[in-house]
Image (cartoon, rainbow, N blue to C red):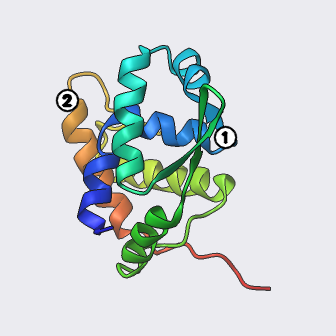
Amino acid sequence: MVIEDVFAVVAEGTRREILGSLRSGDKAVGELVTELEVSQPTVSKHLKVLREAGLVSMRAQGQRRFYSLNPAPLREIELWLASFDLPVPVAPEVAVLAHHQSSVLAAAVDPAIDLAGQPAFGRTVGRAAERAADLFAQLPKLRRRRD
Protein backbone atom coordinates (compact mmCIF):
# COMPACT_ATOMS: atom_id res chain seq x y z
CA MET A 1 0.00 0.00 0.00
CA VAL A 2 1.34 3.40 -1.01
CA ILE A 3 1.34 6.01 1.77
CA GLU A 4 -0.57 8.51 -0.41
CA ASP A 5 -3.37 5.97 -0.80
CA VAL A 6 -3.63 5.53 2.97
CA PHE A 7 -3.77 9.31 3.42
CA ALA A 8 -6.56 9.52 0.84
CA VAL A 9 -8.50 6.73 2.54
CA VAL A 10 -8.26 8.17 6.07
CA ALA A 11 -9.03 11.69 4.83
CA GLU A 12 -12.74 10.86 5.01
CA GLY A 13 -14.24 11.43 8.48
CA THR A 14 -16.55 8.42 8.56
CA ARG A 15 -13.64 6.11 7.75
CA ARG A 16 -11.63 7.61 10.61
CA GLU A 17 -14.59 7.03 12.92
CA ILE A 18 -14.78 3.40 11.80
CA LEU A 19 -11.04 2.93 12.41
CA GLY A 20 -11.40 4.52 15.84
CA SER A 21 -14.29 2.25 16.67
CA LEU A 22 -12.35 -0.85 15.63
CA ARG A 23 -9.53 0.05 18.05
CA SER A 24 -11.50 -1.64 20.80
CA GLY A 25 -11.80 -4.91 18.86
CA ASP A 26 -13.68 -6.74 16.11
CA LYS A 27 -17.15 -5.46 15.29
CA ALA A 28 -19.98 -6.57 13.06
CA VAL A 29 -21.36 -4.19 10.44
CA GLY A 30 -24.57 -3.82 12.46
CA GLU A 31 -22.61 -2.76 15.54
CA LEU A 32 -20.80 -0.09 13.52
CA VAL A 33 -24.10 1.15 12.06
CA THR A 34 -25.58 1.53 15.55
CA GLU A 35 -22.46 3.07 17.07
CA LEU A 36 -21.80 5.59 14.28
CA GLU A 37 -25.48 6.32 13.63
CA VAL A 38 -25.13 6.09 9.83
CA SER A 39 -26.88 3.87 7.32
CA GLN A 40 -25.81 0.30 6.64
CA PRO A 41 -25.00 1.01 2.96
CA THR A 42 -22.77 3.92 4.02
CA VAL A 43 -20.87 1.78 6.53
CA SER A 44 -20.51 -1.04 3.99
CA LYS A 45 -19.20 1.36 1.33
CA HIS A 46 -16.56 2.75 3.69
CA LEU A 47 -15.60 -0.70 4.97
CA LYS A 48 -14.99 -1.79 1.38
CA VAL A 49 -12.61 1.14 0.82
CA LEU A 50 -10.83 0.45 4.12
CA ARG A 51 -10.54 -3.26 3.25
CA GLU A 52 -9.11 -2.51 -0.20
CA ALA A 53 -6.55 -0.20 1.42
CA GLY A 54 -5.55 -2.97 3.83
CA LEU A 55 -6.63 -1.00 6.90
CA VAL A 56 -9.26 -3.53 7.98
CA SER A 57 -9.80 -7.23 7.50
CA MET A 58 -13.08 -9.10 7.37
CA ARG A 59 -14.11 -12.52 8.59
CA ALA A 60 -17.45 -14.16 7.94
CA GLN A 61 -19.31 -15.97 10.67
CA GLY A 62 -22.56 -17.29 9.28
CA GLN A 63 -24.57 -14.35 7.92
CA ARG A 64 -22.52 -11.77 9.85
CA ARG A 65 -19.35 -10.04 8.74
CA PHE A 66 -16.86 -8.99 11.42
CA TYR A 67 -14.23 -6.36 10.75
CA SER A 68 -10.96 -5.83 12.58
CA LEU A 69 -8.31 -3.14 12.44
CA ASN A 70 -5.06 -3.82 10.58
CA PRO A 71 -2.63 -1.16 11.86
CA ALA A 72 0.27 -2.02 9.48
CA PRO A 73 -0.53 0.71 6.88
CA LEU A 74 -0.90 3.23 9.71
CA ARG A 75 2.55 2.28 10.97
CA GLU A 76 3.93 3.20 7.53
CA ILE A 77 2.51 6.68 8.05
CA GLU A 78 3.95 6.75 11.56
CA LEU A 79 7.41 5.93 10.19
CA TRP A 80 7.05 8.57 7.50
CA LEU A 81 6.04 11.18 10.10
CA ALA A 82 8.98 10.16 12.30
CA SER A 83 11.32 11.21 9.50
CA PHE A 84 10.32 14.83 10.20
CA ASP A 85 11.85 14.72 13.68
CA LEU A 86 8.73 16.13 15.31
CA PRO A 87 8.82 16.87 19.05
CA VAL A 88 8.14 13.93 21.32
CA PRO A 89 4.55 14.00 22.66
CA VAL A 90 4.50 15.29 26.21
CA ALA A 91 2.37 14.51 29.21
CA PRO A 92 -0.83 16.59 29.51
CA GLU A 93 0.56 18.43 32.55
CA VAL A 94 3.55 19.62 30.51
CA ALA A 95 1.31 20.65 27.61
CA VAL A 96 -0.80 22.78 30.00
CA LEU A 97 2.38 24.40 31.36
CA ALA A 98 3.61 25.14 27.82
CA HIS A 99 0.21 26.67 26.95
CA HIS A 100 0.33 28.81 30.09
CA GLN A 101 3.87 29.97 29.26
CA SER A 102 2.83 30.91 25.72
CA SER A 103 -0.18 32.81 27.11
CA VAL A 104 2.00 34.78 29.51
CA LEU A 105 4.44 35.56 26.69
CA ALA A 106 1.59 36.63 24.44
CA ALA A 107 0.19 38.91 27.13
CA ALA A 108 3.63 40.43 27.70
CA VAL A 109 4.17 41.07 23.99
CA ASP A 110 0.64 42.15 23.08
CA PRO A 111 -1.58 43.80 25.69
CA ALA A 112 -4.60 42.99 23.51
CA ILE A 113 -4.22 39.32 24.57
CA ASP A 114 -5.20 38.46 28.15
CA LEU A 115 -3.40 36.00 30.46
CA ALA A 116 -5.75 33.19 29.46
CA GLY A 117 -4.36 33.50 25.94
CA GLN A 118 -7.70 34.78 24.64
CA PRO A 119 -7.91 37.79 22.37
CA ALA A 120 -9.22 40.89 24.07
CA PHE A 121 -12.36 42.55 22.78
CA GLY A 122 -11.92 43.87 19.25
CA ARG A 123 -9.23 41.43 18.12
CA THR A 124 -10.03 38.77 15.59
CA VAL A 125 -9.59 35.17 16.64
CA GLY A 126 -7.58 34.42 13.51
CA ARG A 127 -5.00 37.15 14.25
CA ALA A 128 -4.69 36.05 17.88
CA ALA A 129 -4.25 32.44 16.80
CA GLU A 130 -1.50 33.39 14.35
CA ARG A 131 0.33 35.39 17.03
CA ALA A 132 0.02 32.55 19.56
CA ALA A 133 1.33 30.05 17.03
CA ASP A 134 4.30 32.31 16.27
CA LEU A 135 5.08 32.72 19.97
CA PHE A 136 4.64 29.03 20.70
CA ALA A 137 7.03 28.17 17.87
CA GLN A 138 9.68 30.26 19.61
CA LEU A 139 9.48 28.25 22.86
CA PRO A 140 12.20 25.65 23.41
CA LYS A 141 11.24 22.11 22.55
CA LEU A 142 10.04 20.10 25.54
CA ARG A 143 11.40 16.60 25.60
CA ARG A 144 10.84 13.71 27.97
CA ARG A 145 13.61 12.96 30.38
CA ARG A 146 15.10 9.53 30.16
CA ASP A 147 15.69 8.17 33.63
User: In what element is the residue under mark 2?
Assistant: loop
The structure residue drawn at horizontal position 43% and vertical position 40%, both measured from the top left corner, is 16
The structure residue drawn at horizontal position 42% and vertical position 57%, both measured from the top left corner, is 54
Locate residue 22: give its quadrant. Answer: top right
Mark 1, Cα crowd under 10 Å, few <14 / some 14-19 / many 20+, is: some
Q: For the view shown, which residue lies furthest in the bottom direction?
A: 147
Q: Which residue is mark 2?
A: 124
The structure residue drawn at horizontal position 32% and vertical position 32%, both measured from the top left corner, is 119
Q: Quadrant of the C terminus?
A: bottom right
Can you give x and y, in whole percent of width and height, for residue 83 in the image? 37, 82
Decide if residue 100 is on the left or right side of residue 102.
right
Cα distance, mark 1 to mark 2? 46 Å
Q: How many numbered badges does the structure rendering display?
A: 2
Can you give x and y, in whole percent of width and height, for residue 99 in the image? 50, 51
Q: For the view shown, which residue lies furthest in the right direction?
A: 147
User: In what element is the residue under mark 1?
Assistant: loop
Foreground tag (1 vs 2): 1
Q: Is residue 79 visible?
A: yes
The residue nearer to you, when weighing 19 against 132, is 19
Q: Quadrant of the N terminus?
A: bottom left
The residue nearer to you, when weighing 52 against 122, is 52
Q: Is residue 116 visible?
A: no
Q: Earlier in the sequence, mark 1 or mark 2?
A: 1
Q: Which residue is mark 1?
A: 26
Q: Amino acid at mark 2?
A: Thr
Q: Is residue 10 above or below residue 42?
A: below
